[in-house]
Amino acid sequence: MGSDTQTVAGGRTIDKDALLAKYIAERDKRLRPDGNDQYLELKGQLSHYLEDPYTPRVERDPRTDHVTFAFIGGGFAGLVTGARLVEAGVNDVRIIEKGGDFGGTWYWNRYPGAQCDTASMIYMPLLEETGHMPSEKYAHAPEILEQCQRIGRQYGLYDNALFHTEVEDLSWDEAKSRWVIRTNRGDAFTASFIGLGTGPLHVPKLPGIPGIDTFKGHSFHTSRWDYDYTGGDPSGAPLEKLADKRVAIIGTGATSVQAVPHLARACQTLYVVQRTPSSVDVRANAPIDPDWFSQIATPGWQQRWLENFTANQGGSITEEDLVMDGWTDLSRRIRSKINELPPEQRTPRNMLAAFEDSDFEKMDEIRARVDSIVQDGETAQKLKAWYRQLCKRPCFHDAYLQAFNAPGTHLIDTDGQGVERITEKGFVVAGVEYEVDCIIYASGFEVGTEYTRRAGFDLTGRGGLKLSQAWGEGMKSLHGIHVRDFPNAFFVQPTQGANLISNIPHNLTESGRTIAMTVRHALDVGAKEVEVTPEAQAAWVDLLLTGMGRMLGAPDCTPGYYNNEGQDPGPAAALNVGYPQGASAFFKYIDGWRTSGAFEGLTFR
């Protein structure tokens, strides 16, 4: 693919073969045979890591009533679907949520520095409908949680919600054409329709480090941040109680990138324990100017921004890039290189070369940025990401790298091997014990585990069929929303739809709109059941398989949740894809599908 060398910004020359060999070597040292099994499920003596430190549990009587629509999950998926249903005149919507309030991921993630890494204008749902102007380009967690609560209030979703409640069983009652929902609070109520928005970022995981339960100091997971111990608050107040503390944070993904600057300012000693460095590009966060916002916030503004971002990321030719961020930067580079080619040379091979050259160039800039910021040369070298940008979720921050210039902050690089063991006094890396007062686990959430394990139940559909059986050879659906043999059930997630991973809320808002229109139609025609036909589901799956396959986390990437921790995901993963023509095309297609009123592929009876 092109020449073996490439000259990039600053006059640096990239030896492509040597760089690819470096990528492979860095991947290989991190590969482990246990894959996702390296992480611990939080149960038994580890279940205390799941306790809710934010909202007290309120006792209530079990519910045994009936609602038109029940939604499992009170994050963005449940909120946008609930809002669209209310707009469609379906007012008895019940959201069941294991947290103490709405928010989903943003209910749990209150660690210092938490903020979205996709621009607020397109990330925060229903901004136009609620009349909210984001305060900054990348809103911090408290503001995102407030937006969730604002949606809940505006659409009356609090009235019927069940918080601190986990669904244990969902079963289809064929005789009455309704779902029976049972929970850990003794509830046993029914719903004509159900929605499932149990996304991937709500079940915390711990690294399977030997001795993790022997540590005698304080420890917690970042999704259950202990402000009683650290001081401070989610709004950014200093963590004043750490001034005399030695603290270790294990993990250097997106969470750690945001939390480390706050810890570095607060701790007497901070150890940042790294297995794989993140790629950390410029964030350039800034307040949003109210005068500018008032000029652009004309009717339909957020939908225009959503469509513009998706088009720019997908490589479409657009007049402008409204968002202008790190996500669209790579696409702009690729498009520029392709446009430089004469039309007759725009072959698939040359377009792939343009993609690879753009990625080499971008990652070289990100690694050069480390050298320009981090003062200690050895530390800088260990903070460099040796993989393609989309091998792991890209990070953007303007204070993370700078934190390693603080005298009390120390990078403990494990050379891809992770922590050797936890002791009563601290942690061991490469045979050296580091004594600490507190260990913070920034180890993320379960992603690659079975859907039913993360959800906490196995949906039982028509004829007693379990969802785990229906998806035994891989997910099968129409549009990622409707599943055969599970009537009146709707899934709200990206896979087999747009599959737009860079801005998940865009997927969710479109699904919510589609579901509300489908349910409204069912009620209007007096149908008790809505279900995809076997032919329509099979045709959709066949269409999905004509695409290019999974675009994120290639096998030669360093292990992470994008590529199933470097393990072969099996044949079922071939179905974890999106619409072959891309996200923009899917959103246009699904809008036409639902507004036609025909609901092709569904039966209403």
Image: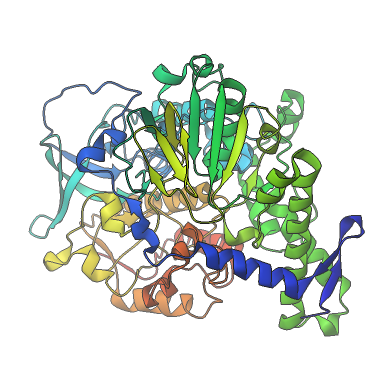
362 above or below 413? Answer: below
In this image, 39 relative to 284: left or right?
Answer: left
Residue at 18% in and 62% down:
461
Q: Which image quarter holds the C terminus? A: bottom left
- Residue projecting furthest to the right: 11
Residue at 31% in and 35% down:
49
* Residue 557 image position (x, y, % from top left): 57, 66
Q: Quadrant of residue 80?
A: top left
* Residue 417 image position (x, y, % from top left): 49, 56
Residue at 70% in and 49% down:
326
Q: Nearest the camera: 83 or 145?
A: 145
* Residue 313 image position (x, y, % from top left): 67, 58
Q: Nearest the camera: 588 or 36?
A: 36
| Residue 361 visible at all | yes
319 above or below 543? Answer: above
Q: Nearest the camera: 314 or 425?
A: 425
